Amino acid sequence: MRALLEEALDRVQSICSVRGQAEHFALFVGRYFSKAGDPPSWKTLGAPYGLDEKTARSRAETAAQHFRGVLRELLRREVETEQDVDQEIATLLALM
């Protein structure tokens, strides 16, 4: 599972880079893949980029949409049905 997540993150980083959304990716990773206990606030994450909370959240959500799409694509290769994809995603989210 870890390798799958790493591949998904690599692909999303590439997508964001090509689209000029490196900031979006950084906000997404900072919020959802933070190694600290509780994720940082949107205000804290947006501050280095001069963004308010709403804009930081919106940009991270753009990257999150890319992530969901890539993750679904990768999981479809591993499982047999769309229901299995949904189950694998639920399992991954529970681990995070």
Image (tube, helix red, strand yellow):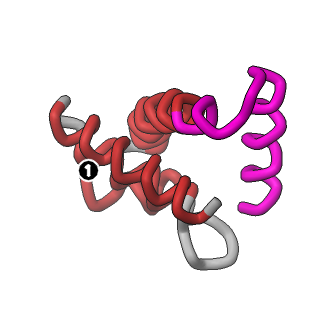
Q: Residue at x 68, y 70 (%)?
A: 38
* Above or below, 5 relative to 79: below
Q: Residue at x 43, y 30 (%)?
A: 62
| Left or right, residue 22 beside residue 82 | left
Using the rendered view, name the quadrant where residue 33 is placed: bottom right
Quadrant occupied by the C terminus: bottom right
Using the rendered view, name the quadrant where residue 89 is placed: top right
Q: Position of residue 13 (x, y in %)?
A: 30, 47
Q: Position of residue 88 (x, y in %)?
A: 77, 42
* Above or below, 66 relative to 17: above
| Left or right, residue 5 beside residue 30 | right
Identified by mark 1, the residue type is Gly
The residue tagged 1 is 50
* Residue 38 seen in this snapshot: yes
Q: Residue at x 82, y 55 (%)?
A: 94
Using the rendered view, name the quadrant where residue 39 is placed: bottom right
Quadrant occupied by the N terminus: bottom right
| Left or right, residue 58 beside residue 93 | left
| Left or right, residue 71 beside residue 9 | right
Closer to us: 86 or 42 = 86
Is residue 33 found inside the magenta-colored segment of the image?
no
* Above or below, 35 relative to 59: below
Magenta residues, start to end: 74-96
Q: Residue at x 49, y 38 (%)?
A: 67
